[in-house]
Image (tube, grey):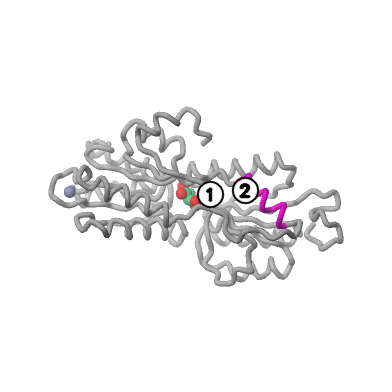
């Protein structure tokens, strides 16, 4: 339990750490891989994991965190579905003397005493990497040859840190080339079906689309379905840039249906459990822990596809 017993090991009387994890949902291949990493690592590290799936609803995540506080877990970890609205429940965890670790997505709280560490990617950098690729490949990306690179953007969940930051980083970089313009942008909520539906509407209203920038592979894969249904070739008639690099995305990349993928590493389990042990033992930990990740072209995808873990 989270009681402040004298035991320096922290955790329950038997020394076992209990973690309460409030997950966003199961909206994408990335999320599935992230959940698997957390559950498998907890198992391997002998950490007693209490796990909830919020189906993408903030109120469910807040409810789950409150239940972990009631259960007096030793440490709480979660991936905030959106950036805002966390201060109250994080204050309650602090008042209950239960440390909190943020994973994957950030919160906008000014009060950094509300959590011990934030483990996850830099989503602005991910957006910049996507934008840099397009600037470098602008000449080949004006697929309809009208002298403009007309980009449509499939945004992630409205209000989510990855959606806000991936749009920001991308916009910052493409500003270097005035022929590149985002002419339409709408949320597909990080899901394949959402990406497909939004892309269908984009295609109906604009037949000069050169590029799709999707904030995750799943929406990019949905866009591929819509583009093919419209009789166009994804990766050729319309270039596609996505973020995540999950198996299905990397497969489409290796087939040339996606042109560039910026990796977002979901395998946060090992770093999370390491942070949790330190935090429960009262050790100081880094306030910000970045994940390692890169980018992939079709050729690189062909090389690594076989041994991708997710
Ligand atoms: C990014 C993560 C995003 C993924 C999506 O760290 O929060 O949420 O990019 C997932 O696939 O749904
Ligand atoms: Zn064009």
- Among the two numbered marks 1 and 2 on one chain, the one whose residue lies closer to the N terminus: 2
**Residue situated furthest left in the rendering:** 146
> CB atoms at circles 1 and 2 under 8 Å apart?
yes
- Which element is circle 2 on? helix
From the top left corner, tell me how far across and down residue 306 is, in percent: 47, 27
- Residue 68's x, y, as percent? 70, 58
Residue bearing the label numbered 2:
271
Which residue corresponds to the image point at 74% horizontal and 67% vertical from the top-left? 96
Instruction: Determine the CA span between mark 1 and mark 2.
Output: 9 Å
Query: In which quadrant is the N terminus drawn?
Result: bottom right
x then y, percent, for residue 309: 53, 34
Q: Position of residue 286 (x, y in %)?
A: 62, 59
Magenta residue span: 269-279
Compared to 268, does 102 lie above or below? below
Q: Which residue is mark 1?
A: 291
Task: Work out whether residue 229 or residue 219 is closer to the camera in this orientation and state it.
Answer: 219
Q: Is residue 158 above or below residue 145?
A: below
User: Quick check: 254 above or below 161?
Assistant: above
Q: Is residue 81 above or below residue 144?
A: below
């Amino acid at each position: 339990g989270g009681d402040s017993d004298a035991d320096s090991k922290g955790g329950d009387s038997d020394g076992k750490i209990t973690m309460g994890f409030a997950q966003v949902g199961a909206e994408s291949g990335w999320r599935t891989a992230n959940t698997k990493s957390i559950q498998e690592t907890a198992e391997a590290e002998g950490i007693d994991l209490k796990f909830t799936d919020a189906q993408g609803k903030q109120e469910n995540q807040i409810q789950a965190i409150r239940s972990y506080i009631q259960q007096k877990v030793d440490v709480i970890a979660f991936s905030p579905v959106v950036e805002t609205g966390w201060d109250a429940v994080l204050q309650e965890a602090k008042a209950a003397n239960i440390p909190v670790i943020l994973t994957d997505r950030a919160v906008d709280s000014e009060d950094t005493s509300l959590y011990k560490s934030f483990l996850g990617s830099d989503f602005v950098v991910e957006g910049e990497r996507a934008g840099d690729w397009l600037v470098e490949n602008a000449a080949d990306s004006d697929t309809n040859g009208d002298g403009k690179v007309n980009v449509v953007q499939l945004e992630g969940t409205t209000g989510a840190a990855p959606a806000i930051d991936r749009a920001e980083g991308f916009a910052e970089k493409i500003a270097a080339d005035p022929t590149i313009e985002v002419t339409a942008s709408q949320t597909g909520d990080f899901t394949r079906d959402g990406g497909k539906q939004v892309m269908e509407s984009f295609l109906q209203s604009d037949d000069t689309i050169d590029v799709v920038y999707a904030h995750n592979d799943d929406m990019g894969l949905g866009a591929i379905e819509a583009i093919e249904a419209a009789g166009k070739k994804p990766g050729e008639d319309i270039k596609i840039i996505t973020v995540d690099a999950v198996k299905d995305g990397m497969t489409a990349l290796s087939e040339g249906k996606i042109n560039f993928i910026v990796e977002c590493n979901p395998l946060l389990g090992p770093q999370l459990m390491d942070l949790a042990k330190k935090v429960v033992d009262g050790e100081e930990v880094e306030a910000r822990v970045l994940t390692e990740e890169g980018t992939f072209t079709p050729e690189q995808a062909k090389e690594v596809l076989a041994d991708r873990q997710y």
